[in-house]
Image (tube, helix red, strand yellow):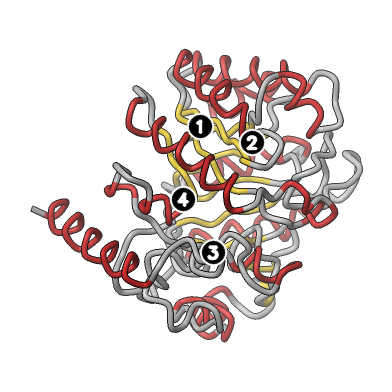
């Protein structure tokens, strides 16, 4: 995610999300991947080492190790260590099931932060994951990670079935003093078969109001991937952000294929074959995204501060179904007012 008025091409992405395996020990209905059997689809060690060298060479500041379930890759802690030894800040996105087993090894490897998903109370969380114990495993992992001194972030995927349970997730995060990050559901991977998880705009707006109140009143950091939240009355202007896919971040899978982000599975080429720099600087897809050169976005006054969600637009709708301009919830005059607020906020932050 990013906050800026002029979109630039940086010499490299600030953050790379690297999916080191396609395997997973859960089958979440809202998962961005189509994760498969836990005993297959592990990355190739030789290619992994080449990818590590490429990330180091290109001065990547942050790498988020993801999957599937990354801890199913037997080299996960080794990969973390090789990256941190070169000064890269490394995070891990996990469902928490295997985290207690590897927590000390990850600590010794200087893992910087841990992201663990929690999408509601036990019944709701387990239902999303087709599991009977995923909730308790996640709770245990969050508490262990916090106790061991990791920076911990609780991730929550907001969708039509858990909007009314976000308060439950927030209360846990607040009690345990854990950061909370909420993002919208994107129909990618298994999610393509569960597009009913996408709320309509009225429910989405209701959700934003709840999250906005959490931001204002929370003792812990609550971040939200919903740039147009600032149309709410009394919104937190300092948190205005737009999509950073292909601008400040890039996704890479276990085989070295690059994507604008891990949700937008538009293959840009393979960094082991085409070269990282060539993809980053010369990809027509990335150029188009940086210019916001999409039919529904290119003439919009909010194209920099929002950018929509290209992953949602790609499938199955052809446009972002939650765009407030498209559904007539926001006027161009509102957008102009928002741009002024951003300028004032940015000037205030710099003073």
> Which residue is depicted at the point 51% across and 24% down?
170
Element under label 3? loop
Q: Residues within 10 Å of mark 3 (few under 14, many from 20)?
A: some
**Which of the two labelled residues, at mark 1 and mark 3, occupies the earlier sequence position?**
1
Above or below for 206 versus 146: below
Above or below for 163 versus 105: below
Left or right, 265 with respect to 146, comes to right
Q: Which of the two discs, 2 and 1, sits closer to the camera?
A: 1
**Which of the two labelled residues, at mark 1 and mark 4, occupies the earlier sequence position?**
4
Q: Residue 129 at x, y = what percent?
A: 80, 33
Q: Measure the alpha-carbon separation of dots 1 and 3.
A: 27 Å
> Which dot marks residue 153?
1
Circles 1 and 3 in contact, beta carbons < 8 Å: no
Badge 3 is on which residue?
323
Q: Residue 39 at x, y = what percent?
A: 91, 40
**Which of the two labelled residues, at mark 3 and mark 2, occupies the earlier sequence position?**
2
């Amino acid at each position: 995610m990013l906050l800026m008025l002029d979109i630039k091409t940086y010499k490299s992405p600030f953050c790379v999300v690297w999916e080191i395996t396609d395997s997973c020990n859960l089958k979440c209905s809202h998962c961005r991947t189509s994760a498969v059997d836990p005993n297959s689809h592990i990355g190739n060690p030789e290619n992994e080492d080449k990818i590590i060298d490429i990330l180091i060479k290109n001065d990547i500041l942050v790498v988020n190790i993801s999957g599937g379930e990354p801890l199913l890759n037997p080299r996960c802690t080794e990969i973390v260590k090789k990256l941190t030894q070169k000064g890269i800040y490394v995070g891990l996105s996990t469902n928490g099931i295997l985290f207690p087993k590897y927590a000390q090894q990850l600590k010794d490897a200087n893992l910087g932060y841990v992201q663990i998903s929690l999408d509601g109370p036990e019944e709701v969380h387990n239902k999303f994951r087709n599991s009977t114990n995923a909730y308790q495993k996640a709770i245990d992992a969050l508490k262990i990670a916090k106790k061991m001194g990791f920076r911990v972030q609780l991730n929550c995927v907001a969708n039509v079935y858990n909007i009314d349970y976000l308060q439950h997730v927030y209360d846990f995060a607040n009690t345990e003093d854990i950061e909370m990050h909420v993002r919208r559901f994107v129909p990618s991977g298994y999610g393509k078969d569960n597009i009913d998880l996408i709320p309509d705009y009225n429910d989405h707006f209701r959700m934003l109001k709840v999250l906005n109140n959490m931001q204002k009143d929370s003792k812990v950091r609550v971040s939200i991937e919903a740039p147009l939240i600032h149309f709410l009355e009394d919104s937190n202007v300092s948190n205005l952000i737009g999509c950073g896919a292909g601008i400040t971040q890039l996704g890479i899978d276990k085989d070295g294929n690059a994507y604008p982000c891990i949700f937008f599975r538009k293959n840009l080429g393979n960094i082991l074959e085409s070269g990282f720099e060539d993809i980053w600087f010369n990809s027509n897809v990335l150029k188009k995204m940086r210019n916001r050169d999409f039919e529904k976005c290119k003439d919009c006054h909010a194209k920099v501060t929002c950018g929509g969600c290209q992953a949602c637009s790609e499938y199955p709708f052809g446009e972002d179904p939650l765009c407030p301009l498209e559904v007539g919830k926001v006027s161009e005059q509102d957008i102009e007012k928002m741009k002024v607020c951003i300028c004032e906020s940015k000037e205030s932050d710099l003073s």
